Every structure is written in structure tokens, then in C-alpha cells.
């Protein structure tokens, strides 16, 4: 049997180059300058698109609060008129921008269900008031102040012969059968934005429309 003798070509390379250790290459960590610039540019574009929407929503915040306050007050007035079987009146003082609800024939603290009403008032965030000479003879049960910076731009309603007229007060009546006075109420803020509220005298629903 022949023995194998390595030729000079079979000599390992380690004899000539020694022991060579090849270190594995590390993966690149981080971002390049181009990637960072690209992210910044995209963020600025998205911010520029979104800012007008946020600004518009913020500008109309007080108008939305006023519209919700009127809507909540009128819904409560209608429900109280039906439950008590008496006329309830929503009064808006356009000088002080105070809106309140009351009845001229009955106090909310004279009966058991009146005590329940007071509990409802507190849960709704309202504050009980007192009758005075500047509220059209209506005994205040709940009242709220509308946000600062808005004013009444227009008010229209169906007027009848026995309706009371006041220089600084707007009165809206809600009746035991669920009907109410038809009215249009328009608020405007200092920027010229507005909201128009129109009441359906049959259903009591209020339709709101924002004005530029």
C-alpha cells in the first residue's frame, strides 16, 4: 500500500500566514443624515396639514359649548313642562350672557319631586338661583353662564299678543303638550365665527349650523 506524502502545494496556508482570525462584520446601527432629514420633512408636512384643522376646532370651542348649553337647557325645559303639566320658560339675558330655566307657578323646593329635581340639577352641574326683578318674574331653578367672548348676533321667534317683551331678555316657552315656541338663535364670537340654532316647535329638537 502506497503512503501519501503531501506535496508542497498541500502545505496549509497557516505556515506562511500564521493563524489568521477573521472578525465578523458588525451590523450598522443608527440612521444616516438623509434618513433623519427625510423623517423631519415628512413630520413638517403632516403638521402643516393637521394644524388648520386643530386651529379651526379650537376657534369654535366656545360656540360649541354655548350650543350644547342651550340644547341641554331646552331639552330639560321640555321634559319638565310635560312632567309637571305646566309651562316652563327658558330665559336668555343677552347682556350678561346668562341662560336660565324657571316656572312662574311653582318652586322646585316646595314638594318631594322638587327635591328630586334639585338632585338632578346638581348632577347636571347647575346651580340653584332665586327669583329677582331682573328675570321677568320667573323663579329661577337652573342657570348657566355662557362662555366669555361670544354674543347674541340674532334672535327670532313667533310672537303672540300676550308675550312679554324685555330689552335684555329673550323668553322661550315650553308647554305641557310637548310643544314650544319656534325660535332662531345665533351666537357669534370675536373672530366672526358663528353658530345658528333653530328649534322645532313640535319635537323640541334643535338644529345647529356653524357659520363662517
Image: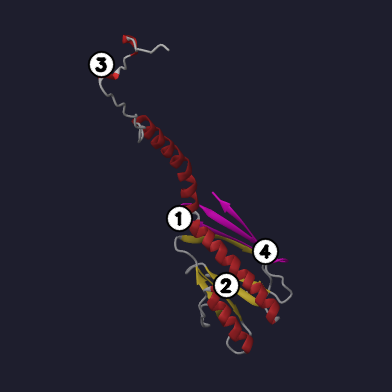
From the viewer's side, name the closer residue of 118 and 203: 118
Residues at marks 3 and 2 touching, judged by CB atoms closer than 8 Å: no
Residue beneath disc 3: 16
Q: Which residue is mark 2?
A: 91
Q: Which residues are magenta?
A: 183-212
Q: Which residue is mark 4?
A: 205
Q: Secondary structure at mark 2?
A: strand
* Res. 174 image quadrant: bottom right
Q: Position of residue 64 (x, y in %)?
A: 53, 59
For the residue carrying disc 1, how many other residues have a C-alpha within 10 Å: few (<14), some (14-19), or many (20+)? few
Q: Of circles 1 and 3, which is in front?
A: 3
**Residue drawn at point x = 48 percent, y = 60 percent:** 150
| Residue lying furthest top | 8
For marks 1 and 3, the one nearer the N-term is 3
SS class of the residue under badge 1? loop
Numbered circle sitting on residue 190: 1
Q: Nearer the N terminus, badge 2 or badge 4? A: 2
Q: Secondary structure at mark 4?
A: loop
State which tag comes first along the sequence, 1 or 2: 2
Above/below status of 42 relative to 169: above
Residue 178 location (% of width, % of height):
72, 72
Which of discs 2 and 4 lies nearer the camera? The answer is 4
Amino acid at each position: 500500500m502506497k503512503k501519501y506524502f503531501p506535496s508542497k502545494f498541500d502545505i496549509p496556508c497557516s505556515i506562511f500566514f500564521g493563524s489568521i482570525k477573521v472578525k465578523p462584520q458588525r451590523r450598522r446601527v443608527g440612521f444616516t443624515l438623509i434618513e433623519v432629514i427625510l423623517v423631519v420633512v415628512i413630520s413638517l408636512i403632516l403638521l402643516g396639514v393637521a394644524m388648520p384643522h386643530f386651529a379651526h376646532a379650537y376657534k369654535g370651542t366656545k360656540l360649541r359649548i354655548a350650543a350644547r348649553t342651550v340644547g341641554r337647557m331646552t331639552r330639560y325645559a321640555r321634559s319638565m313642562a310635560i312632567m309637571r303639566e305646566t309651562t316652563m320658560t327658558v330665559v336668555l339675558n343677552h347682556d350678561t350672557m346668562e341662560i336660565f330655566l324657571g316656572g312662574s307657578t311653582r318652586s322646585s323646593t316646595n314638594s318631594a319631586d322638587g327635591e328630586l329635581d334639585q338632585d338632578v340639577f346638581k348632577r347636571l352641574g347647575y346651580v340653584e338661583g332665586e327669583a329677582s326683578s331682573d328675570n321677568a318674574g320667573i323663579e329661577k331653578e337652573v342657570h348657566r353662564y355662557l362662555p366669555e367672548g361670544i354674543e347674541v348676533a340674532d334672535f327670532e321667534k313667533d310672537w303672540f299678543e300676550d308675550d312679554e317683551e324685555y330689552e335684555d331678555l329673550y323668553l322661550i316657552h315650553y308647554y305641557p303638550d310637548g310643544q314650544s315656541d319656534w325660535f332662531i338663535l345665533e351666537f357669534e364670537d370675536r373672530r366672526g365665527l358663528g353658530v345658528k340654532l333653530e328649534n322645532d316647535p313640535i319635537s323640541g329638537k334643535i338644529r345647529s349650523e356653524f357659520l363662517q
